Amino acid sequence: MRMLAYTGQRTAALTQFEICRQILQTEFGAEPVQALQTLYIQIRDNTLAIPTAPVAHAPTPYHNLPAQLTPLLGRQQAVAAVHALIQQTEVRLVTLTGPGGVGKEPVGRAVAGPHYQILLMAFL
C-alpha cells in the first residue's frame, strides 16, 4: 500500500487495504492491525509523508589506493595482451613486471576493472 501511494497510485493503495481487510475478516474474523489502519487513513486523507531520497555519496573505497584520476592512454596493446593471457584456461596467474613508473598499476586497473582492489589486496 505504501509503495502504491508513493508512486501516485492512491486509489490502488486504498483498494489494496479493502482487499486485505475483507480477507482478514473472511478467513480469521479479524480487522487489520492498527499500523495498517493508520496507513490507510494517511493515504485516504492524503497525509502520508513521501520520503525523500537520500543524497547519494560516492562509496568509500575499502582500500588505501589512490583513485585513478587520468584516463589510460597509449596502453591499449598492453591491456589487450593481459586480457588475452587471463582468458587462457591454462593461465592461473599473470604478474605485471617492470621498472617503477612504467604504468603497471594503471594496466592492472584497466584489466581488472572494479575487482582491481580486491585482487591487489589478496596479494598484499
Image (cartoon, helix red, strand yellow):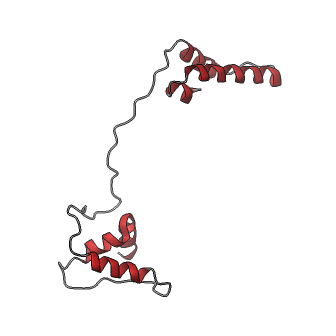
Q: Residue furthest left?
A: 101
- The answer to whether 34 is drawn above or below residue 70 in the figure is above
> Which percent across, then down, holds residue 4?
56, 27
Q: Residue furthest top?
A: 45
Could you tell whether 123 is left or right of 42 in the image? Answer: left
Image quadrant holding the N terminus, namely: top right
Does residue 101 lie above or below 53 as drawn? below
Q: Position of residue 70 (x, y in %)?
A: 20, 63
Residue 85 appears left or right of 23: left
Residue at the image point whose x is 58% and y is 20% from the top: 39
Q: Residue at x 32, y 62 (%)?
A: 63
- Identify whether 31 is placed above or below 102: above
Q: Position of residue 85 (x, y in %)?
A: 40, 83
Q: Is residue 4 above or below residue 74?
A: above
Kindly identify the residue that appears in the image at 34 percent across and 38 percent down: 55
Q: Quadrant of residue 42?
A: top right
Quarter holding residue 122: bottom left
Q: Residue at x 36, y 66 (%)?
A: 113
Point out residue 87 in the picture as x, y percentages from the top left corner: 45, 80
Which quadrant of the view contains residue 64? Answer: bottom left
